[in-house]
């Protein structure tokens, strides 16, 4: 029998038997700090490492195997022996420089298992299992060794054997986008292949019946599970291939046709963490910090150059068809008329930018985003040769860059740069040094990047290793220049914002803009109550809320938002981001020459939080979240619902004892409905304490927002 050591040897069950035994043998187990979750590991009869997971004595993950395929090598994951096991634990609290909360508790027990093949040329790998009170993570480490040096990974086989036909909220396992709508089915009914074709998606590739992560489930016992990955670095993004008959998921990595495999790796290396979060309520998933905790601490130091903020922008007007990104007039989201000449509709003019700056300054909004200011927009989407289309420094003739920057500085508004790469990362990497220097010279500290279209070079995908490394390079190069990144058409968020807190936000979902032009009618009312329990579990979302002109019929009669005005307010609290766009046109926030009364909530609401509490919710149905403003005693509450009309009771027991607050409630008005009467609203002011309870109506597709100000 081999010797096992470790700081927490009491957590390990030593029951090691001969590998030649015909039945599976338990090797060791690791338990969560609260004792509720146990991960057991074993070698089966073929010498394959397997594991199971139980929660409060009931199996959650049944016997699941692990293994690897490398080009030109035999399968790695059979005929293994265990060479050692060690344990460790951590109980610390670390501080987010910005985020959903200031302090994060990081408490786990960890088991490290070292494996080696039997035979004359043994390959080795280690498995790390970290068990938290809210889930677990599993990752592989390939140490420096004699019989592995450089490898081409053809696939990784990490299994999650479910214990039932769970309810699942899922996206198809697309290698290029996360912009599909979520489906809600039983696990046995998942059919990703049926989701391949969509008229509004310009880049999509779904080769397997697989799902993207995070994928969220509810068991018949009422437990909530979400599967994802953490610390995705120098590796391919993971989808989960589904076996609908046996209720099993297996990691299926995004590939590269140029590479002829999934990832080119040099030993030693680590894989990302494979994660499962667990909660007894749906809100437990949102409150979990497992994903960020599985990443390394801040490596780039101070990020005070980035200030969490609300921002306005020349953006929504292009989506609804009022204006165009290009001066030539060919990028009309209404028609896509190639070659149309109508420069009067160019959105990014000097005059228009100054108009937005005035609006921002008058309403306490700190940022301005301008899209379409630089030349190249007439070429980027209607050509197969998108390399070198943009240079990020040459403005259109009707946009006086220096004058806009001077005016913004005078008004106290920070301009956010925009870099649409046209999905040509090689060109962008050549431009980054000059482009970032140009930004800093002009006092710009953050940039929204974009990667619309199929990746150039052909054969690479948005979520493959090559692009994972590109997104990482953008983060690290930007950090050197003290620049923050808001990435659109991104790789998924996997908690790297802990290590690189200049990764402030990202898209990575079907966003607000789909309401403006998608031929399927936009995002249904159930979309955002689903997003809160799926995509938002991975990290901040630049969703661009705050549209007041719900129908925008003066520009387009075939599309609209499928929410009420009150829900648009609630999104500033519900959908987290340290930057929140005030997305509508300035004129749409005016009523009879005065600012809309409901706009006061947007003025008041914070974007950086001391703490966050999920008050209630069910996946796909509704969610209510309270957040305390960082650096103050003020709180804000947001609640949203799907199609179901609700009378939502809100308890204020999250407030401190002995204090009275003034609560201003912005809610759906009489007869409000996302389609029939979306702009009906009411405002009510009451005093509240910790003991207060208030019932607030939510219309179909509606919601409410509450500002709670300390007296």
Image (tube, helix red, strand yellow):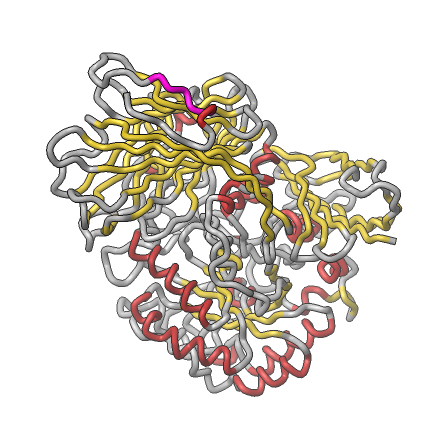
- Taking the spot 67% from the left edge, 53% from the top edge, the residue there is 609
> Residue 173: x and y, percent?
36, 41
> Residue 22: x and y, percent?
23, 12
> Residue 528: x and y, percent?
57, 44
Q: What stretch is highlighted in magenta?
A: 11-15
Quadrant housing residue 163: top left
Residue 223 lies, with reference to residue 366, above or below; the image says above
- Taking the spot 68% from the left edge, 71% from the top edge, the residue there is 360
Left or right: 443 in relation to 266: right
Q: Can residue 374 be seen in this view?
A: yes
Quadrant of image for the N terminus? top left
Residue 527 lies, with reference to residue 190, above or below; the image says below
Looking at this view, is 168 or 34 the one in front?
A: 34
Quadrant housing residue 622: top right
Looking at this view, is 86 or 203 the one in front?
A: 86
Residue 14 part of the magenta-drawn span: yes
Q: Can residue 136 be seen in this view?
A: no
Residue 580 part of the magenta-drawn span: no
> Residue 655: x and y, percent?
79, 43
Residue 660 lies, with reference to residue 45, above or below; the image says below
Looking at this view, is 437 or 327 the one in front?
A: 437
């Amino acid at each position: 029998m081999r010797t096992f050591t470790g700081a927490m040897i009491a957590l390990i069950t030593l029951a090691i038997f001969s590998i030649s035994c015909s039945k599976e043998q338990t090797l060791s187990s690791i338990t969560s700090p609260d004792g509720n979750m146990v991960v057991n590991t074993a070698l089966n009869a073929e010498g394959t490492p397997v594991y199971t997971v139980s929660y409060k004595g009931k199996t959650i993950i049944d016997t699941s195997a692990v293994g690897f395929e490398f080009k030109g090598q035999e399968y790695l994951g059979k005929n293994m022996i265990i060479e050692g096991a060690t344990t460790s634990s951590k109980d610390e609290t670390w501080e987010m420089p910005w985020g959903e909360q200031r302090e994060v508790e990081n408490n786990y027990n960890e088991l490290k298992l070292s494996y080696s093949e039997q035979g004359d040329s043994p390959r080795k790998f280690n498995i790390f299992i970290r068990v938290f009170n809210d889930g677990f993570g599993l990752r592989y480490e390939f140490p420096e060794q004699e019989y592995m040096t450089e490898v081409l990974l053809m696939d990784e086989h990490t299994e999650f054997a479910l214990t039932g036909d769970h309810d699942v909220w899922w996206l198809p396992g697309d290698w290029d986008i996360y912009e599909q709508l979520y489906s809600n089915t039983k696990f046995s009914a998942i059919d990703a292949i049926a989701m391949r074709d969509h008229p509004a998606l310009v880049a999509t590739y779904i080769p397997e019946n697989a799902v993207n992560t995070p994928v969220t489930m509810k068991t018949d016992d009422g437990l909530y599970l979400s599967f994802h990955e953490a610390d995705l670095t120098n590796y391919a993004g993971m989808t989960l291939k589904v076996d609908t008959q046996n209720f099993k998921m297996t990691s299926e990595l995004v590939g590269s046709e140029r590479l002829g495999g999934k990832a080119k790796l040099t030993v030693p290396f680590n894989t990302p963490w494979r994660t499962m979060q667990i909660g007894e309520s749906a809100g437990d998933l949102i409150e979990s910090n497992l994903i960020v905790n599985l990443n390394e601490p801040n490596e780039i130091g101070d990020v005070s150059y980035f200030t969490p903020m609300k921002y306005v922008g020349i953006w929504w007007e292009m989506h609804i068809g009022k204006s165009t990104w290009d001066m030539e007039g060919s990028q009309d989201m209404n028609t896509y008329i190639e070659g149309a000449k109508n420069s009067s509709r160019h959105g990014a003019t000097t005059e228009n930018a100054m108009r937005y700056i005035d609006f921002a300054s008058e309403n306490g909004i700190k940022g301005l985003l301008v899209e379409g200011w630089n030349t190249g927009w007439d070429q980027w989407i209607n050509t197969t040769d998108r390399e070198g289309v943009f240079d990020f420094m040459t403005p259109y003739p009707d946009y006086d860059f220096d004058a806009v920057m001077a005016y913004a500085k005078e008004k106290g508004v920070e301009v956010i740069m925009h870099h649409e790469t046209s999905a040509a990362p090689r060109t962008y990497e050549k431009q980054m040094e000059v482009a970032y220097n140009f930004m800093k010279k002009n006092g710009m500290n953050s940039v929204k990047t974009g990667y619309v279209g199929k990746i150039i070079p052909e054969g690479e995908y948005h979520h493959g290793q090559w692009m994972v490394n590109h997104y990482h390079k953008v983060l690290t190069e930007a950090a050197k220049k003290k620049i923050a990144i808001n990435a659109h058409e991104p790789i998924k968020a996997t908690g790297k914002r802990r290590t690189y807190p200049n990764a402030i936000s990202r898209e990575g979902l079907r966003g607000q803009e789909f309401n403006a032009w998608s031929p399927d009618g936009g995002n249904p009312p159930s979309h955002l109550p689903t997003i809160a329990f799926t995509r938002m579990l991975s990290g901040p979302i630049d969703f661009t809320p705050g549209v007041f002109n719900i129908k925008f019929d003066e520009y387009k009669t075939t599309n609209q938002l499928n929410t009420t005005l009150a829900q648009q307010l609630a999104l500033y609290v519900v959908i987290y981001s340290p930057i929140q766009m005030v997305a509508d046109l300035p004129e749409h926030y005016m009523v009879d020459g005065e600012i809309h009364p409901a706009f006061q909530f947007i003025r008041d609401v914070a974007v950086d939080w001391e703490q966050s509490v999920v008050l209630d919710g069910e996946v796909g149905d509704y969610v209510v979240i309270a957040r305390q403003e960082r650096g103050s005693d003020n709180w804000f509450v947001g609640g949203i619902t799907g199609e179901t009309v609700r009378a939502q009771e809100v308890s204020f027991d999250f407030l401190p004892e002995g204090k009275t607050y003034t609560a201003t409630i912005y809610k759906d008005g009489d007869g409000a409905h996302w389609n029939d009467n979306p702009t009906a609203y009411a405002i009510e002011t009451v005093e509240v304490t910790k003991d207060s309870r208030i019932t607030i109506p939510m219309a179909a597709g509606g919601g409410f927002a509450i500002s709670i100000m300390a007296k």
